[in-house]
Image: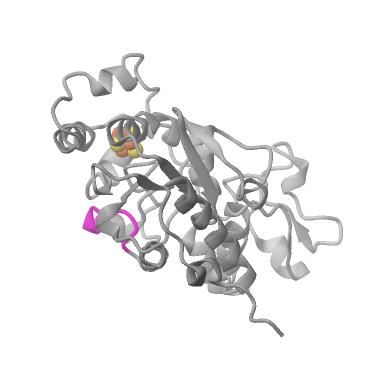
């Protein structure tokens, strides 16, 4: 089997896994050739006896080698220590925090591989904050979150809310791009340890900006914010969670929408954004309320 086909299949499984799917039906030959965790790690990660079903329960599946764990965060690396000495207006505080983050080497492997820290962008006075999982290759290059195709879609979503990118704040749970094995492209999901290590920076951003609403984009962002969930993003979206007293609306990641053009899926995401708009007391036109509804037969 051709390596390129195997790579595409692995990416497909990865995408399903990122969005909470536990099963993927693949041709028997392909399922047998995808990398799976060892039998001792979890029986559910193995291909079934039919050779057709593969259950990617391990984040190592289709993502290459597990990266080294970052150094355990020091005890003094908490919200209070990060915010110590950070004073002035919200813009001043964010700028001081940006400097601290830029010098961070808590995850030595990411500090080594990153082009730069991708801190976040937007209005320090924003009432609405979007949180994704981690910078990808383009974000790492440009130093700004959500600048690729998914970022363009996020901008469209913001525009549909009659807002601009400059009015909101956009950040990721992880501030450095998850490293990839040498000579490989693509992006990998951040590890739990990496996200735990970096979360205090995001919480400091939230403490400074004090948004009214946070929209969490995708299951990994939700996991980064709240730890592993017992359910999928499909079940979490449409509900409210809470981070440090701020309501959080989980929804699908824009990259999932890019891979799935289903109108009903777009409507679900739009429903989450409408809920965020209501929480923000933003005006909502009848036209906006009707976006992505099936036209009457
Ligand atoms: S990912 Fe976060 S905690 Fe880790 S080195 Fe980068 S800024 Fe520091």
What quarter of the picture does the N terminus occupy? bottom right
- Residue 290 coordinates in the image, percent (x, y): 56, 71
Image point (55%, 48%), residue name? 219
Q: Identify the colour scheme used.
A: one colour
**Residue 98 against residue 277 in the figure, above or below:** above
Residue 217 in view, yes or no: no
- Residue 73 coordinates in the image, percent (x, y): 37, 22
Image point (57%, 53%), residue name? 18
The answer to if 114 sits in the magenta stretch is no
Nearer to us in this view, 172 or 30: 172
Nearer to us in this view, 116 or 214: 214
Nearer to us in this view, 262 or 197: 262
Image point (36%, 60%), residue name? 183
Q: If the picture is divided into quarters, which one holds ligand 1?
A: top left
Seen in the image, is 53 located left or right of residue 249? right
**Residue 246 against residue 254 in the figure, above or below:** above
* Region in magenta: 140-147
Please, which residue is most extreme toward the bottom here?
A: 297
Count of numbered circles in the view: 0
Image point (32%, 30%), residue name? 207
Q: Main secondary structure of the magenta part?
A: loop
The answer to if 143 sits in the magenta stretch is yes
What quarter of the picture does the C terminus occupy? bottom right
- Residue 149 coordinates in the image, percent (x, y): 38, 68
Residue 223 in view, yes or no: yes
- Dividing the picture into quadrants, the one containing residue 33 is bottom right
**Residue 227 against residue 258 in the figure, above or below:** above
- Residue 41 coordinates in the image, percent (x, y): 69, 37
- Dividing the picture into quadrants, the one containing residue 150 is bottom left
């Amino acid at each position: 089997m051709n390596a390129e086909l195997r790579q595409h299949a692995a990416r497909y499984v990865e995408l399903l896994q990122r969005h909470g799917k536990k099963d993927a039906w693949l041709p028997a030959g392909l399922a047998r050739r995808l990398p799976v965790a060892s039998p001792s790690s979890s029986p559910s990660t193995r291909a079934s006896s039919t050779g057709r079903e593969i259950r990617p329960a391990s984040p190592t599946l289709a993502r290459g080698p597990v990266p080294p764990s970052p150094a355990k965060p020091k005890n003094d690396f908490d919200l209070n220590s990060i915010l110590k000495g950070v004073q002035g207006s919200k813009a001043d505080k964010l700028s001081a925090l940006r400097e601290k983050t830029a010098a961070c080497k808590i995850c030595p492997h990411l500090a080594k591989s990153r082009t730069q820290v991708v801190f976040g962008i937007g209005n320090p006075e924003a009432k609405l904050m979007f949180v994704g999982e981690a910078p990808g290759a383009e974000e790492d290059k440009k130093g700004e979150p959500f600048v690729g195709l998914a970022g363009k879609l996020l901008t469209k979503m913001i525009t549909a809310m009659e807002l601009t990118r400059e009015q909101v704040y956009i950040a990721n749970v992880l501030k450095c791009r998850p490293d990839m094995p040498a000579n490989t492209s693509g992006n990998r999901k951040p590890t739990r340890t990496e996200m735990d290590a970096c979360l205090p920076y995001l919480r400091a951003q939230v403490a400074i900006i004090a948004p009214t609403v946070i929209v969490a984009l995708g299951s990994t962002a939700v996991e980064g914010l709240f730890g592993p969930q017992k359910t999928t993003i499909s079940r979490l979206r449409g509900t409210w969670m809470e981070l440090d007293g701020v309501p959080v609306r989980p929804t699908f990641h824009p990259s999932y929408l890019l891979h799935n053009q289903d109108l009903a899926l777009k409507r679900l995401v739009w429903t989450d954004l409408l809920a965020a708009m209501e929480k923000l007391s933003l005006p909502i036109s009848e036209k906006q309320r009707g976006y992505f509804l099936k036209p009457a037969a």
